[in-house]
Image (tube, rainbow, N blue to C red):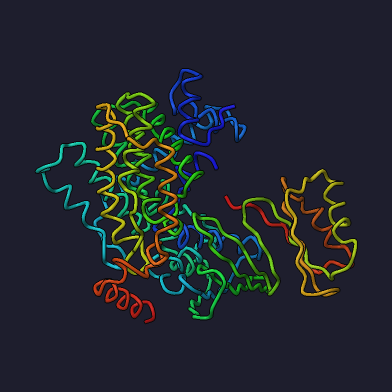
Amino acid sequence: MFEYATVADLLNLAEKYNTSLAQIVLRREAEEYEMEEQQVIEKMRQRLRICADSIKEGLYDDRLSVSGMVGRDAVKIENMEPLLLGNIAHRALLYALAVSEGNAKMHKIVACPTAGSCGIVPAAVFAAGEAKGASKEKYCNAFFTAAGIGNIIAKNACVAGAVGGCQAECGTAAAMAAAAVVDILDGTNVQAAQAATLALKNTLGLVCDPVAELVEVPCVKRNGFYAVHALTAAEMAMAGVKSFIPPDEVIAAMYEIGRMIPVALRETSEGGLAKTPTARGMQNKLQKRQNR
Amino acid sequence: MGVFDIIGPVMIGPSSSHTAGAARIGLLSRYILKEEPVKADITFYGSFAKTYCGHGTDKAVIAGLLGCGADDPAIRNAYELAAEKKLTIKIRTSDEDVQHPNTVKINLFGIDGKTMEIVGVSLGGGKVSIRKINGFMADISGETYTLLTVYNDQSGVVPLVSSFLSKNDINISQMRVFRKGKHQQAVMIIDTDSRVPDAVVEEINALKIMKSVIAIDPLR
């Protein structure tokens, strides 16, 4: 039995079977859905291909979204040599913007864990993987590790902005991405779990206040920020930095905070950025255009 | 919950509730109509009414009605596709108070004259539920094979219908019964592990007490 409910369970199982987190996640999936492991791997490879395509398509498309609020920032990043960021972080920022802008422009994406946060995991994993010359198998394992972390957060907290604010969406995505990047770097299971924890811990309290109720502002640029955030967490974990608060306690805290965030800041667009004069002006403009 | 609920679903952006869910409601409505639709009057409520343009909710519903899944890039060109397939579309918004913020009502007209009024809600993460069909309460998720039967409320209908299923070795996973009132019209919704063959649907439909029987396939 490979069932796990917590990060502690996942780490214990991996230790018991002397294997990686990714292997436990894969075996549990095969067991639960009565599939061959190879079938599960093939399905994950398909998802990886769609993620890779969503990066390419996002980079290629320089149109604005229907609202006109987002759509051309990936191009700006691509056209400039990095001034401050290293190459991997610069690529991660670029890819995350490309995927998230593509999402706003009705491209095909893999929700990861949600559509609003779909840029973070592919961006961080592909930016790190390309730089390290990762094999297909390695990408696949990294995504299984990410899925394991995501499943645990979904089970013990939540991954919907309407339930727990943006910390539940972009926070979870960053945690998943950080663990996956540690996998790409051949880090240990504990380091992967720590990277996820450090990433999630430092998104706590993040609210969901989208302008005009659209998945655009602040979502698109936030995907760029949190892809780099995930790399920072992975870098810390690889250096041996540990979260003082253990993984499962941080996840529980995220959920508790999520339930305390006022409803106005949980995807209802009734507070925060969504209530600023500029946002209200935009909303009125879009409403008029739609009614025409 | 599995790995591919987290690394997924694969969908056309931007929103799992307002785009992917909307496409699934459209497609499920097509499965329920069981005819090529020629006309669709679509009414959006709540958040759908406020934001359908920016989320492409209209395009998603239309593409679904034309047979597209939530991951089909054809959603982007749904209006052109509708013109090509001779489906007439009318979009309306309503500020009427509804229970769920992401609600759509679709009045569908089929090529052979069948009409249906379908109310669907998008529950988040791409999950949906058809809540009303022709004024009847329903609860259809599109995640399993579903048999929808409409009849006059009386005792013995549940074992009668289920006997046809057990005779054909079809396992029932869930069952829900709604009625307008005692001895009035009733709806029984049966989720099954396998497809109910057309011949069995015909057999149940031939029962005197039955008004209609519809077998609905799960969404892709």
When asked about the image quadrant of residue B108, the answer is: bottom right
Residue situated in front as seen by the camera: A114 or A105: A114
Can you give x and y, in whole percent of width and height, for residue A202 in the image?
Answer: 30, 45
Residue drawn where x is 47% and y is 44% of the image: B6
Tell me if B216 is positioned left or right of A206 in this view: right
Spot occupied by residue A92 in the image (x, y as percentages of width and height): 25, 42
Residue B48 sits above or below residue A227 on the image: below
Residue B213 visible in the picture? no
Which residue is painted at 31% across and 71% down in the image? Answer: A275
**Is any part of residue A17 visible from this angle?**
yes
Q: Position of residue B44 (x, y in %)?
A: 50, 74
So how many labels did they put on this image? 0
Q: Residue at x 39, y 26 (%)?
A: A189
Question: Outermost residue toward the top?
Answer: A18
Q: Is residue B128 left or right of residue B15?
A: right
Q: Nearer the viewer, residue A82 or A25?
A: A25
Taking the image as shown, residue B193 lies to the left or right of residue A20, namely right
- Locate residue B190: give its quadrant: bottom right
Q: Quadrant of the N terminus of chain B?
A: top right
B189 on left or right of A248 = right
Percent from the top left, x then y, of residue B185? 80, 73
Task: Kindly indicate the quadrant of the structure image that contains residue A143.
Answer: top left
* Residue A270 vertical position relative to residue A26 in the rendered view, above or below: below
